[in-house]
Image (tube, rainbow, N blue to C red):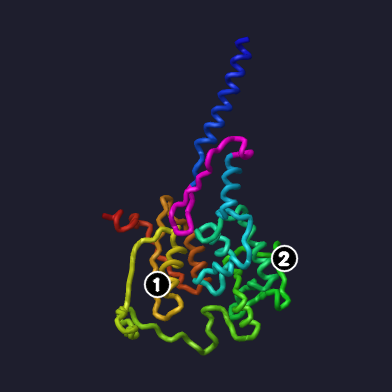
């Protein structure tokens, strides 16, 4: 009798504990579209609402559009990063997890289906850059190109471009950003400290010759910094960015990773000079140094 009573009490305690856990985890916080915390109240939660607590949370976030099974090509075009003419497929995939403007994907491989559909309907083209300029391969639905989902490569070396860029390429009037035709050089930039005179503005409006900002940006906000701050100036001449990057992990940086960094810089057409100073002290932010 006592054994049966003890077994019943244990089962009841287990049920009560389970329900208490479900009731306790009723709020979910995530990064919202305005770079602030968004709170999702799940309401009165009980174990009969779903098979698992995580399943309940995922279902509710899907209902609100915070989590998606995939993206439409049109959504990708509407939220195209202003930093790129050619947007690498890896950067597209990463944007789904780094930018609050994008819904989180349940499966990161779903971006391959988005790119494949976008090529099929002609919203985007799937391209690679040739060393001398131009695109190879160039896959775009209206020009007869097709792309299977399994053939989509997520890489820094493969890109997508918008319909208008693909149309100009087909017409022979476009080239990859940054590639100049032979014999044509970029016009020299004004030396630092010698800005060009500001153009006169409307009567009563004050125009400044130059604005400068410097500060520390957390890695999680690099893309948002471009989108919210720099993109408003990106279409006009006169924007310059001087970047200093330091990497000081507790275990140090291996020679292999230094060489990989140099290779990546060369692939971007940048100087591969990397200062290596094993004796450097952790610098941190200005506030930390104080």
Q: Quadrant of residue 241?
A: bottom left
Q: CA distance from mark 1 to mark 2?
A: 39 Å
Q: Nearer the viewer, residue 111 or 284?
A: 111
Q: Nearer the viewer, residue 153 or 76?
A: 76
Q: Position of residue 62 (x, y in %)?
A: 59, 51
Residue at left offset 62%, top offset 40%:
50
Residue at left offset 67%, top offset 62%:
113
> Would residue 266 be visible to someone looking at this image?
no
Q: Name the image quarter holding the C terminus.
A: bottom left
Q: Is residue 53 above or below residue 187?
A: above
Q: Which mark is residue 53?
A: none
What residue sits right under mark 1 in the picture? Answer: 241
In the displayed structure image, the side of residue 215 where residue 49 appears, left or right: right
- Asked whether residue 34 is drawn in magenta, I would say yes
Badge 2 element: loop
Q: Which mark is residue 148?
A: 2
> Would residue 287 be visible to someone looking at this image?
yes
Residue at left offset 61%, top offset 82%:
168
Badge 1 element: loop
Tell me the magenta residue range: 29-52
In the displayed structure image, the side of residue 258 where residue 127 appears, left or right: right
Q: Position of residue 196 (x, y in %)?
A: 33, 84
Q: Is residue 101 above or below residue 166?
A: above
Q: Nearer the viewer, residue 234 or 1?
A: 1
Crowding at mark 1 (Cα within 10 Å: few <14, some 14-19, many 20+): few
Q: Position of residue 67 (x, y in %)?
A: 58, 53
Crowding at mark 2 (Cα within 10 Å: few <14, some 14-19, many 20+): few
Q: Position of residue 249 (x, y in %)?
A: 42, 53
Q: Name the image quarter holding the N terminus.
A: top right
């Amino acid at each position: 009798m006592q054994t049966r009573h003890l077994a019943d009490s244990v089962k009841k305690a287990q049920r009560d504990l389970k329900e208490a856990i479900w009731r306790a985890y009723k709020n979910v916080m995530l990064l919202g579209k305005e770079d602030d915390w968004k709170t999702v109240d799940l309401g009165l939660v009980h174990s009969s609402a779903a098979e698992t607590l995580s399943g309940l949370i995922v279902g509710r976030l899907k209902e609100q559009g915070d989590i998606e099974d995939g993206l439409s090509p049109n959504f990708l075009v509407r939220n195209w990063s202003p930093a790129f003419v050619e947007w690498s497929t890896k950067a597209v995939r990463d944007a789904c997890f780094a930018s609050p403007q994008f819904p989180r994907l349940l499966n990161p491989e779903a971006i391959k289906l988005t790119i494949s559909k976008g090529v099929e309907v002609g919203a985007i083209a799937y391209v690679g850059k040739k060393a001398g300029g131009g695109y190879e391969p160039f896959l775009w639905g209206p020009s007869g190109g097709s792309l299977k989902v399994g053939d989509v490569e997520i890489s820094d070396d493969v890109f997508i471009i918008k319909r208008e860029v693909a149309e100009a390429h087909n017409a022979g009037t476009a080239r990859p950003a940054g590639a100049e035709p032979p014999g044509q050089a970029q016009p020299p930039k004004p030396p630092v400290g010698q800005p060009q005179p500001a153009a006169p503005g409307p009567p009563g409006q004050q125009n400044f010759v130059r604005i400068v900002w410097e500060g520390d940006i957390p890695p999680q906000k690099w893309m948002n910094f471009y989108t919210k701050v720099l993109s408003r100036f990106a279409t006009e001449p006169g924007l310059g960015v001087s970047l200093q990057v330091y990497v000081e992990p507790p275990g140090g940086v291996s020679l292999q990773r230094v060489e990989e960094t140099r290779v990546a810089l060369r692939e971007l057409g940048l100087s591969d000079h990397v200062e290596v100073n094993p004796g450097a002290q952790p610098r941190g932010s200005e506030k930390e140094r104080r």
